[in-house]
Image (tube, helix red, strand yellow):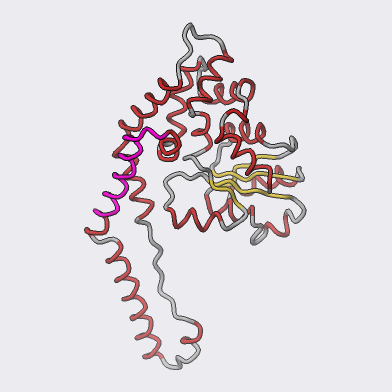
Amino acid sequence: LPALLGSIPAILSSSRAIAVEGRESSIDTIIYRWLAESKDTEIVAVGGCEEVQAVSNKTGVWDTIAPAVKILGIIDRDFKPKVLLDSIDATNCVTLAYHEIESYLCHPAVVVQVAKGVGSLEKVPTEDEIKALIVDEFNKELIQIVARRVFARSTIRLGVSIARNLLKHINDQATLESTLVKAAEDEVFKASTKLSAEAIKEIAKEELDICNKALTSGDIEELLRLVPGKGLLNKIAPKAGCRNDTAFARAATKHVKIDSVQSLKNLQAEVNKR
């Protein structure tokens, strides 16, 4: 709630806004303002994935609060499972192709351009050297990444309910109780099936295979989709002559040509077409 309340003045002050996840949006603000063609675009952090969708689709109070403001929601890919990502893509939101916005700055082509532009290093790193660093960090975090992807896929929502067309025919306590108990038993069965030892082991195997395939292939697109970008950018920033991730982001807006990096070009198109 505090994040949502704090975002209202910022959203109302502009004709266009981009709603992002989180509580702190310094790098988001730097990068999305850089990508946005409309320079009065306001970048606001509104909380979690559900809050971003509520703001961008103007559900609930948002239709009353900001009826004239165009709001685009941007959702981090993060560790979210495909079924959730597919449902988000059907709304007035953009799901990032990479893990999070910092991941775009970790692309080797971006890092090399920043390093050359900053000009404080005796030797500018090569794209291959940056990719090797990303692979090394991925290997170090492999088990944690797999675990968090399993956590995300193993999340289920449970609740006892009765269909409306069935409920209207229930007229006594005994029938109500038996119907509720049956509904509860169905939910317990759903949970025991999805969270069985065999199911969890299979999910873990699938996720480990996905990660190992990315490591083996060295596909930078897949690596940046899977590896968390925030920590990675802090490791990469000094390699480009920047003291931290925020300094790197500011340097990127000065020294990187968006059209020269396909992932940035694609994201810019997504940011501006809606």
Q: Which percent across, then down, holds residue 244?
A: 50, 21
Q: Which percent across, then down, holds residue 230?
A: 46, 32
Is 209 in the magenta? yes
Taking 112 as reference, is 90 above or below it?
A: below
Q: Which percent across, then down, holds residue 181?
A: 34, 80
Q: Quadrant of residue 132?
A: top left
Is 216 in the magenta? yes
Q: Quadrant of residue 192?
A: bottom left
Q: For the stretch drawn in magenta, what is the main secondary structure? A: helix
Q: Nearer the viewer, residue 59 or 209?
A: 209
Taking 255 as reference, is 62 above or below it?
A: below
Q: Which percent across, then down, holds residue 213?
A: 32, 40
User: As drawn, is 13 to the left or to the right of 25?
Assistant: right
Q: Residue at x 51, y 14 (%)?
A: 241
Q: Residue at x 55, y 25 (%)?
A: 246
Q: Nearer the viewer, residue 8 or 130?
A: 130
Q: Which residues are magenta?
A: 201-219
Residue lying farthest top? 122
User: As drawn, is 149 to the left or to the right of 53?
Assistant: left
Q: How many marks?
A: 0
Q: Residue at x 74, y 38 (%)?
A: 38
